[in-house]
Amino acid sequence: DAGVIQSPRHEVTEMGQEVTLRCKPISGHDYLFWYRQTMMRGLELLIYFNNNVPIDDSGMPEDRFSAKMPNASFSTLKIQPSEPRDSAVYFCASSVADTQYFGPGTRLTVL
Amino acid sequence: QKEVEQDPGPLSVPEGAIVSLNCTYSNSAFQYFMWYRQYSRKGPELLMYTYSSGNKEDGRFTAQVDKSSKYISLFIRDSQPSDSATYLCAMTTYSSASKIIFGSGTRLSIRP
């Protein structure tokens, strides 16, 4: 299996622009998680899905952030409009049973 | 106060040394405890997973959980330069398929 796939790996954008991050979970995994990692705040859970349904979005920082999972093999995290403080590495992870498998992350820089 | 506290380091030790990494936590409802390893510019990967109190050993790695003290540890024996990474403790009240709370990570460097 190729593991969790994220795209793009790097994104540089200007403040105010819309940013869309993409994730393909491991086939057969029924949970999907979006995390954000910064030096200041560490690894934070933003939202997670079970069987494509959002279960807990309490970590989503603001209404500028939204996430969707239209099917079992694809999820997006959108930031609109983006701000410099959104600069971070965004990870997607998927799991079945007891282990979360993380993707390589998307490094987002908002200028 | 954060739910999970972890010394960020950095921690630098010579090759072959025993490494001790630790976390404390405040939520007594945590039941599942994990250690993740994260290499530079990579995603975290699960290293050890334990349920409730006790020890678990896997090769050179030993995870300890002391629920009475709300304290968990990861020991690395015969440390190797390839062990150089950031180690994150993590815990949850249910299974790791649900919401996990991560520590901030300890950066470890093993000197050849």
Image: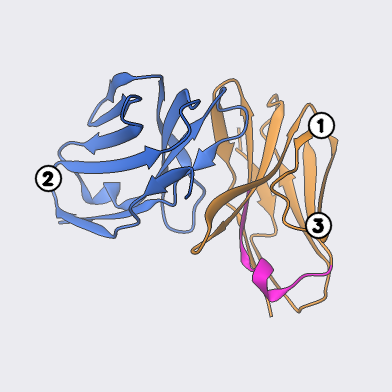
Chain colours: A orange, B blue
Subunit under mark 1: A
What crowding class fits label 1: few (fewer than 14 Cα within 10 Å), some (14-19), or many (20 or more)?
Answer: some
What residue is shown at x 82% (from left), y 61% (from top)?
A: A64
Q: Is residue B83 visible?
A: yes
Q: What residue is disc 1 on?
A: A52
Q: Is residue A15 above or below residue A45?
A: below
Q: What residue is disc 2 on?
A: B17
For the residue pair B110 and B92, the one nearer the viewer reads as: B92
Check residue A78 in the rendering and tell me which mark sits there, or answer none.
3
Subunit under mark 3: A
Subunit under mark 2: B
Check residue A69 in the rendering and tell me which mark sits there, or answer none.
none
Residue B1 in picture, x, y percent from top left: 47, 50
What amino acid does circle 2 point to? Ala
Q: Earlier in the sequence, mark 1 or mark 3?
A: 1
What amino acid does circle 3 point to? Lys
What amino acid does circle 1 point to? Asn
What crowding class fits label 3: few (fewer than 14 Cα within 10 Å), some (14-19), or many (20 or more)?
Answer: some
What residue is shown at x 28% (from left), y 60% (from top)?
A: B10
Give residue B56's quadrant in the image. top left
Q: CA distance from mark 2 to mark 3?
A: 45 Å
